[in-house]
Amino acid sequence: MSSEETSEKKTEEPKAEEKPATEKPAAKPAAEKPAAKPPPKKPAAKPAPKEPEPPAFEKSIADKITEKFGENTSVSFVKPDRVGIKVNRDSIHQVAEFARDVLNYDHVDSVAGVDYPADKEIEVVYHLGSYTDSSLDRQVLELATRAQREEEPLPGRDSTKLPSLRDIFYSVEFHEREVFEMLGVYFEGHPDNRRLLLPEDWADLPPLRKDFRNKGR
Amino acid sequence: MSKPVLPPGLAIQKADERIMTLNVGPQHPGSGHMRIIVQIDGDYIVACDPDPGYVHRGEEKMAEYRNYTLNVPHLERPVIHDSCNILYPYVLASEELLGLEIPERAKYIRVIASELNRCVYTMYWLAIYGIFLGHSTMFMWPAGDRELLIDLLEKMTGARVTHSYFIPGGIRNDLPANFEDVCLRQVNYFEKRIKEYADVFYDNPILISRTEKTGVLSRQDAIRLGTTGSVLRASGIDYDVRKKEPYDVYDQLDFQTNVMKSGDSYARSRIPWLDMMESCRIIRDALQKMPKSGSVRVKLKPNPKGELGSVYKRVESGRGALGCYIVSDKKPEPYRVKLSVPSFRNLIALPHLLIGEKLGNMPSIYWSLNYWPVEADR
């Protein structure tokens, strides 16, 4: 298993840098015709998603949440098949419970942490999906909540904390562990807040924070 | 700067006199690049702690420094055998952010490439699954037959693996001349060939007795743990992103999803094999319905800037639903790229399946999860 992988890696590595050069000539013959097309398309496409009202089913999901939780939640977007809700740190647990028990979402697709140093906050985004409710097959509900960010992080021992959703959605177990090590967000109530992907002796900043810079970049 | 913290769970634990702690991996061929810490009481596993991360490469961090096109070659690294599928959600999401409309022919070619790639990946996985059950024929046959499709992909993309074929805006280059005929011939032969695997492997009483009723994942658990792909469908839930949320032209193609109810190791290994036959169907159908000419990519501006906002897209890869979440802040580089990979999602099922099983069943259960360590680590 490893032999092919490593050998491919060696031979391909220089290629990754060459690639933009090889790509350009390939683009030219095909590009001449459609080159004229995109400009008229873009202005036509831009007002289109903004003008028509949001899809009804998705809007009803968003309305249900905002009605129940009022000021603690705000709708960030309603797109076809996608609903984004911003939730206060304190009510994320209740909103997730509501999404599970009333809206029938039953698992978490992914948990992504995004660092916003300018706002002094770290956002954690839960993508919820459903296997059991066929009306939600295409839907992904995005619950975003923000934790306070510290300049000198001490993962697990500073104020960067959020309530864990592990008791509501069991599937977040490893995802939350990943967010903890990558961004330093401690999930209160998670039974197993250990490192997952990083080495045990990692002593630097949580690597997905924006102030952690890759060498040479 | 934080002080070094040794996670308590990874420190050496003093176990009971009769309980032995065993590290499987991270360089053990039976686990791939990953460590599974198991505690055994005699022959039975009493505790299991998967420890991924041995091949963590920080793909998500690297993606924050490169523009949308330059991210393509390195984001496919986590699964080089399924490189089209791991790029698929990234490319779909960046196209939404960049506001690109993809030519019809490119959509069909993408579907063909992604289905070929799914088969290539599954054959590789099947070879490993076979050899770890001690079935050498099942290593040789898939490893050999896989070459048929690799040849096709090489004709399409120029590389055996790591194709970098999908790019925001379409695909890198058009099909070579006469590709349709060669593809049809190879795929037909491939399908005939994989049907023979039933005789030697899937209907083999030794395999059935080793894998049936081992590592049973119930329907409720499969949902609760948020598993995906073949693991989910083997537990009786008919969820395939290609059917449920069709992307590109999957809604125009004729295929079924395969579901089994038993949720055991056998069902989990059979579903990918059945899926390969559906892939052959999809490829034949796509070859027929594909527009015979036309452009295959939209020209991009140099360093295109994404719209302000975020997009979450998902596709069905060889292992299950693969999602990509991109946050853009109107710069040429994405602000954040998050890959939600099926291997990582299915890993949570491993402790549930292993506890209470015999150690000898570990390879069959572990590999039946269709787990790819490098993908889980990213």
Image (spheres, rainbow, N blue to C red):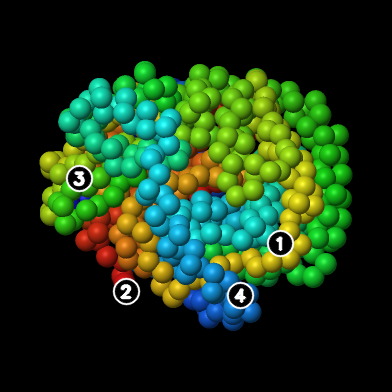
Q: Where, quadrant-wise, is the C terminus of chain A in this rendering?
A: bottom left
Residue A64, horizontal then vertical, whole percent:
32, 25
- Mark earlier in primary sequence (3, 4): 4
Badge 1 element: helix
Q: Is residue A28 left or right of residue B64?
A: right
Name the residue carrying label 1.
Answer: B153
Badge 2 element: loop
Q: Are marks 2 and 4 on the same chain?
A: yes
Q: Which label is found at residue A33?
A: 4
Residue B363 visible in image: no
Name the residue carrying label 3.
Answer: A155
Residue A89, horizontal then vertical, whole percent:
19, 34
The residue under label 2 is which amino acid type?
Answer: Gly
- Mark earlier in primary sequence (2, 3): 3
Chain under label 4?
Answer: A
Badge 4 element: loop
Mark 3 vs mark 4, foreground winner is: 4
Q: CA distance from mark 2 to mark 1?
A: 34 Å
- Mark earlier in primary sequence (2, 4): 4
Q: Which label is found at residue B84?
A: none
Disc 2 and disc 1 in contact, CB within 8 angstroms: no
Q: CA distance from mark 1 to mark 4?
A: 27 Å
The residue depicted at 54 percent of the width and 34 percent of the height is B228
